[in-house]
Amino acid sequence: MPNDSDDPSRTGSSSCRADPGQEGMGRRELLKAGMGTMAALATLAGVTAPLLSLRDGPSLDEFLQRHYTQLTPEMMEKILARIEHEIAFRYGVKTSVRDYKPIPDVEFAYALNLNRCNGSRRCVYACMKENNIPLDHPEQAYIRVVELDNDSLDLEEGNVLYNHDQVPQEGKYYIPIQCQQCRKPPCTKVCPVQATWTEPDGVTVIDYNWCIGCRYCMAACPYEARRFNWSRPKFEPEQINPDMGYLSNRIRPRGVVEKCHFCLHRTRQGKNPACAEACPTGARVFGNIRDPKGKINFILKNKRVYILKADAKTIPRFYYFFDR
Amino acid sequence: MGGLIMYLYSFAGFPVLVSALALLMCSVSCSSFQNQAAATALYERPQALQPYDIAPVRGPTRALRLHRDGDEYPCTSCHEGFTGDLGQAALEGEHNNLTFNHGLNLRCLNCHNPANPDTYVYHDGSEIPGDTPTRLCAKCHGPHYHEWQIGIHGRSNGAWSAGLGPQTVLDCVQCHDPHRPSFQPIEPEPPPVLTRFDLPARQGHAHAE
């Protein structure tokens, strides 16, 4: 009713008076209002139409799920059952999704022998198979192996896409880079919804159901260790690793960030991470840094240790070391 | 219905409306999940399947034997009462397929036992059994042997700490050829494709043929 106040004949009249001249206007107003409502509804239906065809969208339970730290064991049981059900529906695979808890008095740390690593990328592909990353998307892999000249440590000059017949090449060395599990992680600091945090055993994890996909953490990470799921991953049933952890290798939905989690579903059960299992040269050493007689502490005390981008002051739990 | 929506709209604005609609649709898709998943049989991966290769580069540790044409011969079948200078020149004959490059260690009998050729020899002349050569390597490579015992040289599979479960520690000869101990170059796995511009370059070779 935009012209209401401009019309002098109607300024003083009450709208409910039964005036024969005004009755037609009332019906027209009613029609107008009705048309307006219908138009608004139609617009709304048009705007929300994509939601109807959205098969990727969250289910009601997922929509109402609370933050990981607020979940009771009973709620987690239901969530895990729901995730197993969704994977069964989408991929036709029977899986077991568990929420593995940290082992008390254990803080994980990694050491990698740069004299031994020969750049064979076995760790990269073992990681992809273990952590349900589609093999036709190798750019999503958590580990990148950088080839560098022997007398340089300039990562900008490094080559990730080397494709030789044989490695190692003369005059080159290889440095695999994955999440460094920092003690002062910039990625968790910038997360606007606290979907990523550091666990008591030193592993920075992501709740894929809480992540909103803003990618701030990817911008904050000095090691470029985080990956974004641009699409929902596609698998043949036999490619899927059925042993899944809620915070680790369960199949990620589209639009969330993921990264290396030291294979939490394996290491919290006492097993080696997949990359250390598959390394043909034995360059990778995984252990508990709180064990004073453990492997990691032996390396820290007796070897020349290098910390990647130490000037970023992130204080990683991932150490590179040299034999000679 | 329309009036209700307009009422909601005026009361709490657009977000409430959208979330209410979203909830409605979510509940619809939720029920369809349950119907369809129950209808199909699920694939179950065998527990024993190892999806990635964890086999040692040189296979399992074998007893000291001559391997020729798929057969095994004990060393004593030729070396019974065999005398003579077993220097590098003796790699001719049955052993001519060996590539020998072990630094300063140039004499066969530094490792092989002249008294019993099926075994190795320690500093004091005592025997080291032919199927456990690790102690033989420790004769010279003490620091590496020490690091191997701690667990920071070589690979171990299974548990990340010995107390947490079964652990398989690889022997020296499962990675190193004793006659040519430096780790041999291997073929790398394919590189990651970082941008779409990398893709045609890699596939171009296949199309050109």
Image: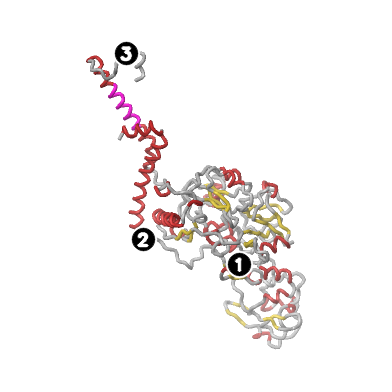
The answer for how far apart the CA atoms under marks 1 and 3 are is: 90 Å
Q: Nearer the viewer, mark 1 or mark 3?
A: 3
Q: Residues within 10 Å of mark 1 (few under 14, many from 20)?
A: some
Which image quadrant is residue B122 in? bottom right
Q: Amino acid at mark 2?
A: Ala
Residue B57 point in image, percent of width and height: 61, 67
Residue A32 lies in the magenta-colored region: yes
Q: Nearer the viewer, residue B46 or B114?
A: B46
Which image quadrant is residue A122 in? bottom right
Look at mark 2 in the image and give the residue it sits on: B41
**Image mark 2: chain:** B
Is residue B208 visible to the viewer in this orientation of the structure? no
Q: Amino acid at mark 1?
A: Ser
In the image, residue A139 sits, relative to residue B153, either above or below, namely above
Look at mark 1 in the image and give the residue it sits on: B161
Residue B199 point in image, percent of width and height: 54, 47
Residue segment shown in magenta = A29-42
Point 62% across, 51% down: residue: A160
Residue A215 lies in the magenta-colored region: no
Point 68% across, 78% down: residue: B93
Quadrant including the N terminus of chain B: top left
Look at mark 3 in the image and give the residue it sits on: A12
**Image mark 1: chain:** B
Classified by dominant secondary structure, the portion drawn in magenta counts as helix
Secondary structure of residue under mark 1: loop
The answer for how far apart the CA atoms under marks 3 and 2 are is: 75 Å
Q: Residue furthest top?
A: A8
